[in-house]
Image (cartoon, rainbow, N blue to C red):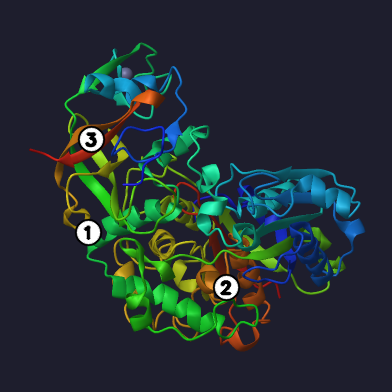
Amino acid sequence: MAKSKEAAPDIPFRIMPALTDLNAHFWQGGRDGELRFQRCKGCGYYLHPPSVICPKCWSKDIGIEAVSGRAEVLTFSVNVQNWMPGLEPPFVLAIVRCLEQDDLRLTTNIVNIDPYEVTIGMAVQVVFEPHVDQEVWLPLFEPAK
Amino acid sequence: MSEATDLIGERRAVISGVGQSDIGRRLFRDPLELTIDACLAAIEDAGLTTADIDGLSTYPGATGPNGFSGGGITDVHDALRLNVNWFTGGLEYPGQLGAVINACLAVSAGLCKHVLVWRSVYEGSAQGSGGRAAVMPGGGSTTTSFKASGFMQWLLPFSAPSAATWIAMYAQRHFHEYGTTREQLGQIAVNSRKNAALNPKGIYRDPMSLDDYLAARMISTPLCLYDCDVPCDGGTAVIVSRVDTIPDLRKPPIKVEAVAAATHGRPSWDQYDDLASMPAQDAGKELWKRTDLKPSDVDCAQMYDGFSFITVAWLEGMGFCKKGEAGPFLEGGQRIALDGELPLNTNGGQLSSGRLHGFGFIHEACVQLWGEGGDRQVPNNPEVAVACSGGGPMASTLLLTQGR
Ligand SMILES: [Zn+2]
């Protein structure tokens, strides 16, 4: 993997998210090894991307909770084109669904597997890529153990 | 049709003229010049003068990354010294042709009579030798000062800057759910290449076989190089006029039968519920509620192909085939050929004739309805056409008919 001079060894350059009060729980939960989402205290619905109101019960009483980090691959693509410096192709871009809720999903990379062996429906689990100097821990996924 | 006719306001709008600048892979000309060339050509085509233009509408306005916009409202307004009663330009539209739909609504509401609508790009020149990375967020550099925000924060950190990879995931899901194959998908690119060969303004006009397509290098599975459109320089303009101005026009205008621009569900590339489709299906569903015409009445379809799978989403979303059946519909390519049951992207689409970003489709729909297609003219006097733009969470569609 290509390295930027700011990042730790073996950590590819990545464009980082702009951290805000609303999204920090998601990007920084990995510091404690946790995949975190907003969750409505009124009805238990997980919200992602973060919002200011629960779209199910309209409660504004929203907390932050960790999920198990276990998920299912909804779809993926083996990206071959080199668009930008950083992660070395081929790599897998995927949309995964967290097991806790049918519509709790995120775009991510599937790692620690031959890119051409990823399949739709595959069980995966979160693994964090630390960008400590940027205070961001990227939630990536690998085959479930 | 489920809407009351008096609520279908877009029927008070017609398309009176279209125009296009030179189009090329890299022209290295001032993008505003391309824009103005297209605008003046459209005004002349309609039989009008700049003094008649009293409305302006464009996508995306003077904004976006390098090469994305060849001129906003103010640029054109001032360059042509217009007097306008209404204008709008913006990025948050339901697909690029949202700018045309806005114009239809403005004339229907009586705010103006003749709206100049345009979209121009100079991505070819802007990319230069830097490739697509040169026009991407962050400019392809490894600087840590650029941070992703808005919806891009959920994609860019995962090294996914291009819609190619986002749309590849939709295609993969479609392949998985419905058994669609690369051989079937490839017919879209092969068909576009055939049509571009007949279009003097086509960019890639050399023959391409299905084998050539299958042998092309992969970009992001299952999409290969020929599933991706061609960055180019060029401007396209259309004039939307109010129906009571028809006597002032040079030729019988194209009638706007119905428009739609729906997105039902989450407006997002990765949160939209149905990952084997797109809001094209929502726009399609709404369109057919506004007309007595049926998909089987359509004589040619000009549907967005920034990446070939988007056309699949439109084929199904517009009801030209059943959901999940675009693969078999495309098989062999005969149905979508110039002499097939649904001639598709008859100018070569964006895949072979350049990313004019949505406006090439409405231009071509009008050219075909006017019978001005030359070598690529759809046979048997086409009377009904659709123009569809946008992919992912953005979708806008217009159903157009011959005015005579
Ligand atoms: Zn709730």
Q: Viewer-nearest of labels 1 and 2? A: 2
Q: Is residue B246 left or right of residue A60?
A: right
- The answer to whether the residue bearing label 3 lies less than 8 angstroms from the nearest atom of ligand 1 is no
Chain that bears disc 2? B
Q: CA distance from mark 3 to mark 1?
A: 19 Å
Which residue in the protein does label 1 denote? Answer: B176
Q: Viewer-nearest of labels 3 and 2? A: 2
Which quadrant of the frame does ligand 1 lie within? Answer: top left
Chain that bears disc 1? B
| Residue positioned most to the left | A145
Q: Is residue B388 visible?
A: yes
Q: Quadrant of the C terminus of chain B?
A: bottom right
In front: A77, or A102? Answer: A77
**Of callouts 1 and 2, which one flags the residue occurring earlier in the amino acid sequence?**
1
Instruction: Say which amino acid is labelled 2.
Output: Ser
Mark 1 neighbour class, 10 Å CA radius: few under 14, some 14 to 19, many 20 or more: some
Q: Which label was assigned to residue B353? A: 2
The residue under the point 38% across, 24% down is A133
In front: B370, or A38? Answer: A38
The residue under the point 37% across, 74% down is B216
In front: B14, or A116? Answer: A116
Query: Mark 1–mark 2 contact, CB under 8 Å?
Result: no
Which residue in the protein does label 3 denote? Answer: A102
Instruction: Say which amino acid is labelled 1.
Output: His
Element assignment for label 1: helix
Chain that bears disc 3? A
Q: Is residue A9 left or right of residue B246?
A: left
Query: Mark 3–mark 1 contact, CB under 8 Å?
Result: no
Q: Is residue B138 left or right of residue B159?
A: right
Q: CA distance from mark 1 to mark 2?
A: 30 Å
> Do badges 1 and 2 share one subunit?
yes
Instruction: Say which amino acid is labelled 3.
Output: Asp
